[in-house]
Amino acid sequence: QEYLVWKWRPSGEANSTKKENSIRYGSSLRVKDGEVAVFFYKQNDGTLQDFIVGPYDGKIETANFPILTSIVGSLWGGNTPFQAEIYFINLQGNNQVKFGVPYFDVADPRFPDFTVPIAVRGTITFNLTDYKQFIKLNRLIDFDLDKFGQQIKASVAKFVKNFVANCPLDNNIPVLQLERKVVEISDLIQARLKGVFEDDFGVNLKRFDISAIEIDKESENYAEFIHLTKEQQARRAEIDTEQYERVSKLSAESQFIQAHT
């Protein structure tokens, strides 16, 4: 019921017969709305393809199969079986992959030499729109959606780790405020990943959603970081107090001078 690529097999089993891909000219073909059927013909000059976009309900003998028509007409006269691998590709469904990037070190712009461990979790939603690009980049005969998802997650994890690790320094965002920026960071990463998904995987990235940016609050680095932050805030408060007292004193002296002139 849920698939991205499904190979048609007469018996439902892989390699059930040596004649598995022997299709008779004139057979019925049904392609549902939101699907495309891909016919692969292996010829001496390479692999040729016919694409039948659904909805379609007809026989394999019409002008909808220009490549097949030329092959059958030249080789068999249109009366005997031909060899073809047939795949159905889902163009309509949304595929979701959850990803997680384990703890990695991220520096704070106030303390660039000090790092805090951070983990990222989220969801990727993609679908298939450019099916011709997709079949150029992926081997359909042994396509497995779970393995495909693993490839996507590996690429995303590497990209997310690099982006989030540099985000505080590049944008002057304190590490502790990254958790408040999940929407903005998600949008920035989605914009950069969209081209990667098209070029490397042949799919359309619909949504990239970070669900959590987590700081390891049990780590020693986090405890030390909080200590350093409190010290910095205390020094700032002290400086602000001194500046306030200095300004107040100057103001009082100015008022005294004005009162006696």
Image (cartoon, helix red, strand yellow):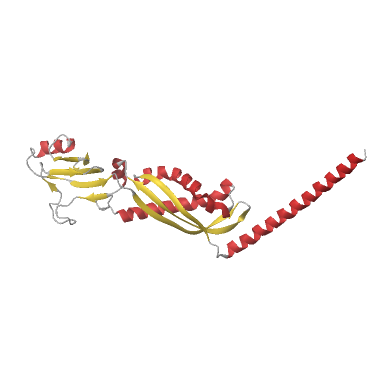
Residue 108: percent from the left, percent from the top?
Answer: 59, 53
**Which residue does the image show at 29% across and 41% down from the upper left?**
132
Could you say which quadrant of the image residue 99 lies in? Answer: bottom left
Foreground pick, 100 / 179: 179
Q: Is residue 123 left or right of residue 26?
A: right
Q: Residue furthest front?
A: 259
Foreground pick, 137 / 171: 171
Q: How many numbered discs, if any?
A: 0
Foreground pick, 237 / 85: 237
Q: Residue furthest top?
A: 63
Residue 103: percent from the left, percent from the top?
Answer: 50, 60
- Compared to 192, does 213 lie above or below? below
Residue 232: percent from the left, percent from the top?
Answer: 68, 56
Q: Is residue 176 visible?
A: yes
Q: Is residue 248 left or right of residue 40?
A: right
Q: Is residue 140 visible?
A: no
Residue 58: percent from the left, percent from the top?
Answer: 14, 40
**Which residue does the image show at 58% across and 58% down from the upper left?**
115
Foreground pick, 138 / 180: 180
**Which residue does the image show at 38% across and 45% down from the upper left?**
205
Q: Is residue 246 left or right of residue 145?
A: right
**Which residue does the image show at 58% across and 61% down from the upper left?**
222
- Compared to 215, does 192 lie above or below? above
* The C terminus sits in image quarter: top right
Q: Residue furthest right?
A: 260
